[in-house]
Image (tube, rainbow, N blue to C red):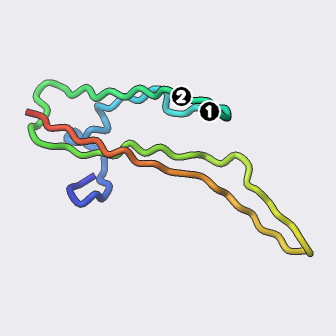
Amino acid sequence: MDEAGKPIEPSESTLKPWTLINPTQFTIAPGGYQTVRMSIRLPTGFVEGKRHSILSIEQQIDHAVTYNTDGRGATLEIGSRYGLPITIDVQ
């Protein structure tokens, strides 16, 4: 993302090509938890300066809730999305 928080395309000067996340997709049982590991491995000679990024975590909906009454219906999908800001200063 840029300094204003707007997404930018990945390039050699952004963190995305050098960021490793494992696992990238998973299912959590009710009451359960999941450890997600993240590392940033910059190449030698990476341009100095601050870099800002967002780790986005989004719940995927497998089954929408459908409600019908009196011939009317509604479909409801409830999920969540979280963003964890990440800032590094390459010196």
Crowd tier of the residue under label 2, counting other residues whose Cα lies within 10 Å: few below 14, some 14–19, many 20 or above = few
Mark 2: secondary structure:
loop
Relative horizontal placement of residue 90, taking residue 52 as reference (left or right): left
Q: Position of residue 56 (x, y in %)?
A: 43, 45
Snapshot quadrant of residue 90: top left
Please report contact status of discs 2 and 1: CB closer than 8 Å, yes or no: yes
User: What residue sits 7% from the left and 33% below the top?
Assistant: 91
Q: Amino acid at mark 2?
A: Gln
Mark 1: secondary structure:
loop
User: What residue sits 9% from the left and 37% below the top?
Assistant: 48
Q: Nearer the viewer, residue 32 or 39?
A: 32
Q: Which residue is mark 1?
A: 28
Snapshot quadrant of residue 84: top left
Q: Position of residue 46 (x, y in %)?
A: 14, 32
Relative horizontal placement of residue 81, taking residue 14 as reference (left or right): right
Q: Which residue is mark 2?
A: 34
User: What residue sits 71% from the left and 61% below the top?
Assistant: 76
Q: Position of residue 35 (x, y in %)?
A: 48, 26
